[in-house]
Amino acid sequence: MALRLDDKIAVVEEVSAIAAKAHSAVAAEYRGITVEQLTQLRKTARASGVYLRVVKNTLARRAVKGTDFECMQGGLVGPLILAFSLDDPGSAGRLMADFTKLNDKMVVKLVAIGGKEYGPAELDRLAKLPTKEQAIGILMGTMKAPIEKFVRTLAEPHAKLVRTIAAVRDQKEAA
């Protein structure tokens, strides 16, 4: 069933609003994927904070115009499903990487982040980006390490003195 003009405008506005606030995007060709598999993909996408939509390419080009994902316009060819990361930059990449491992018919065509388009080979790099909680944990560990080393350095002379006294005591007891 063909979309009326009002429906097309609504689709473009919806996808454009999502693209304006998204962190990253992945476009994949879904030719040969069953309805059950797409339903499972959509369910997983909702749970992981990824906006997933099948959009006609002409409407998708209009929707991403004026956003960070305008770079994708040239690669929107064929039957594509668009995935936009809303929570953290790597969520769309993780979703598509996990799904393509299970379904070889899903072929990633484009990856976009930060206003730059990358090839499908960069999907793994996007998928390996840490979540917000993981990034905070890494940052805290990095900030905490010098302080811990400083405290150990300050405590070492006292510990060495205690070990020396204990060794002298053990030597006198043995004698």
Image: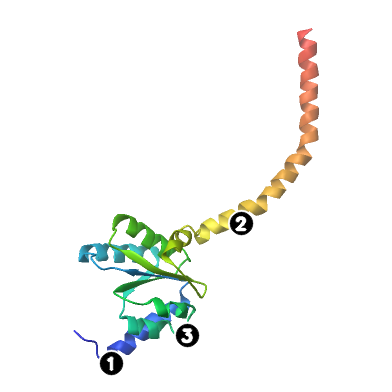
Q: Which residue is mark 1?
A: 5
Q: Residues within 10 Å of mark 2 (few under 14, many from 20)?
A: few
Q: Quadrant of residue 37?
A: bottom left
- Residue type at mark 1 is Leu
Q: Which label was assigned to residue 146?
A: none
Q: Answer with left or right where residue 29 lies relative to residue 160.
A: left
Q: Quadrant of residue 39?
A: bottom left
Q: Which label was assigned to residue 139?
A: 2
Q: Are marks 1 and 3 in contact (CB under 8 Å)?
A: no
Q: Secondary structure at mark 1?
A: helix
Q: On screen, 165 above or below 3?
A: above
As drawn, the residue found furthest toward the bottom would be 5
Q: CA distance from mark 3 to mark 2?
A: 33 Å
Q: Which residue is mark 3?
A: 66
Mark 1 or mark 3, which has the lower sequence index? Answer: 1
The image position of residue 14, as x and y in percent, is 37, 82
Mark 3 or mark 2, which has the lower sequence index? Answer: 3
Q: Nearer the viewer, residue 66 or 133?
A: 66
Q: Answer with left or right where residue 55 lies relative to residue 92.
A: left
Mark 2 or mark 1, which has the lower sequence index? Answer: 1
Q: On screen, 66 above or below 75?
A: below
Taking the image as drawn, is residue 53 in sight?
A: yes
